[in-house]
Image: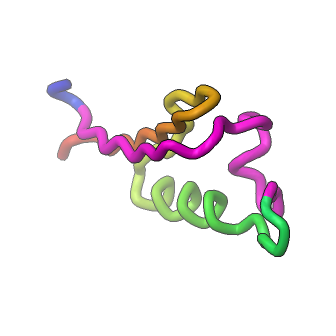
């Protein structure tokens, strides 16, 4: 839209089972994961006055939205 810029990132991985937890520090669903990836991304984007959110997740599709306000 005229006020924001959005970037969408998607893949064909299985859906997110715990969408309310995925941005929590230390939360992981991977064996050997440390749960820092999405947490670091979200914090960095927010430090730049942006927003990272799960846009949609189905059984075979996941999409994240990154939003920045236009200057």
- At x 35%, y 41%, the residue is 8
The stretch in magenta equals 4-29
Vertical relation: 57 (above or below) 50? above
How many numbered marks are there?
Answer: 0
The quadrant of the picture occupied by the N terminus is: top left
How far from the left and from the top, in percent, is residue 25?
78, 61
Q: Is residue 9 magenta?
A: yes
| Above/below status of 70 relative to 28 | above
Tell me where residue 6 appears, x and y as whole percent.
29, 39
Give me the residue at 56% from left, 36% from top: 54
In the depicted view, which residue is nearer to us: 47 or 42?
A: 42
Principal secondary structure, stretch drawn in magenta: loop
Residue 26: x %, y % from top left = 82, 63
- Left or right, 45 with respect to 21, comes to left
Colour logic: rainbow
Residue 2 versus residue 35 in the image, above or below = above
Residue 17 location, x and y as percent?
Answer: 77, 35
**Which residue is found at the position 82% from the left and 74% from the top?**
32
Q: Is residue 4 left or right of residue 17?
A: left
Relative to the observer, which residue lies in front, 29 or 38?
29
């Amino acid at each position: 839209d005229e006020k924001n810029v959005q970037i969408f990132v998607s893949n064909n991985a299985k859906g997110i089972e715990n969408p309310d937890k995925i941005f929590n520090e230390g939360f992981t669903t991977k064996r050997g994961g440390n749960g820092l990836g999405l947490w670091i991304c979200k914090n960095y984007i927010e430090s730049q006055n942006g927003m990272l959110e799960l846009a949609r997740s189905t059984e075979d599709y996941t999409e994240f939205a990154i939003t920045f306000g236009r200057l």
